[in-house]
Amino acid sequence: MSKCFSLTESINWCYRSFFSKSGLRSTVTDLGDGTMMHCWVPKTPEETKPDLVLIHGLGANAMWQWGEIIRFLVPHFNLYVPDLVFFGDSFTTRPDRSESFQAQCVMRVMESNSVKKMSVVGLSYGGFVAYSMAVQFREAIERVVICCAGVCLEEKDLAEGLFRVTVVEEAINILLPQTAEQMRMLMRYTFVNPPKLLPSCLLKDFIDVMCTEYVEEKKELIRAIPKDRKLSHIPKISQPTLIVWGDQDQIFPLELGHRLKRHLGENAELVVIKNTGHAFIVEKPKEVYKHFKSFLVAPPTTPQNHK
C-alpha cells in the first residue's frame, strides 16, 4: 500500500514556500554536458547588496541545511543557494566526483545568472567546494567562509586516529544513513544535544525522501575527499577567509580548523562556537549569523582567533 502522508515531504513543501516568500525562486540550469544544476536565486537581485553563495554539505538538500539562517541573511545579501550535484534536483552523467568539478558546476550556475563577483560560504563538504572555487576562480571570489570543513585533512589522518573512524567506509555508513539506527548515530555525531525520542517511522520517512537517491554516487564523493590528500598539495587561497567551527565537532575535529588557520596564516580568522557540534548552524544560528555578517559585510580587519 502506498504511503499517504510524509512529514518530510510536508516540511520540504514548507521550506519551498519559505524560500519563495523570502524573495528567492527555484531554477534549474542545463550546463549542456549531462549536468543539471538546481539553485535558489533572487527573484529581483539588488545592485546595492553583495552576492553571496551558500554551499551545503552532505545530507538533505540545500533548503534543509540553510533554512535556519536564511531569514537572517536575506536582508543583507543577494543569496544564491545551489543543490550540489547528486543532491536535491542536481545531477550529472559525467564520472567526475571531485570537489573541483562541483566547484566548476556552481560557478557555471553563477555565470548563467550574470554574477561576476561573489563571496561564498561552504558548510562541511560544501567547504571543500567553496575552497576549490576560491582556488580556481580567484578573481570572482572575494571572501570565503569555511564552516567545519576538514579542507586540510590528509589521507593518513584516518589511520593515525584523528577521526572517530579509521577507514572511509566507516565514515560512509555514518554520513549516508539507510536505517533509523544509523540516522540516530549520525545525529549523535553532529549535535551536542541530539533530538530525543524520535520515532523510527519518522526517521525512516526522512531517509526514504532524502537519503535513497544517488547513494552510490554520494559514496564516491566521500571516497574522493581523502584520496591521496596531503597538506603540502593544498593551495593557499589569497582571499580573506573566515573559519567557523563547533568546539565539540565529532565529524571534523576542531584540530582541522586550527590546521587550516595555520595553513592560511594571517589571511584567515578562526571563530569557535562554544557548546556546539558539527551542526552548529542549527544549534546556534543567530550567533553564526553574527559572525557571517561582521565578516562579509564590514571590511575585514586584521584576522584574529576567537574562542
Image: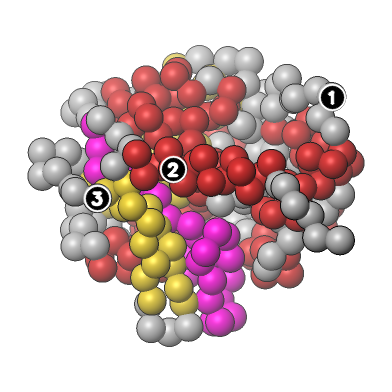
Q: Which residue is mark 1?
A: 197
Q: Position of residue 38 (x, y in %)?
A: 43, 62
Pointers 2 and 1 in contact (CB under 8 A)?
no
Please tell me whether residue 99 belongs to the stretch shown in magenta.
yes
Going by the numbered disc 1, the residue's amino acid type is: Leu
Q: CA distance from mark 2 to mark 1?
A: 28 Å
Q: Nearer the viewer, mark 3 or mark 2?
A: 2
Q: Quadrant of residue 96?
A: bottom right
Position of residue 245 relative to residue 226, above or below, is: above
Side (left or right) of 213 relative to 21: right
Residues shaded magenta: 76-103
Q: Quadrant of residue 280?
A: top right
Residue 17 badge: 2
Position of residue 237 relative to residue 69, above or below, is: below
Please tell me whether residue 184 belongs to the stretch shown in magenta.
no
Lower sequence index among marks 3 and 1? 3
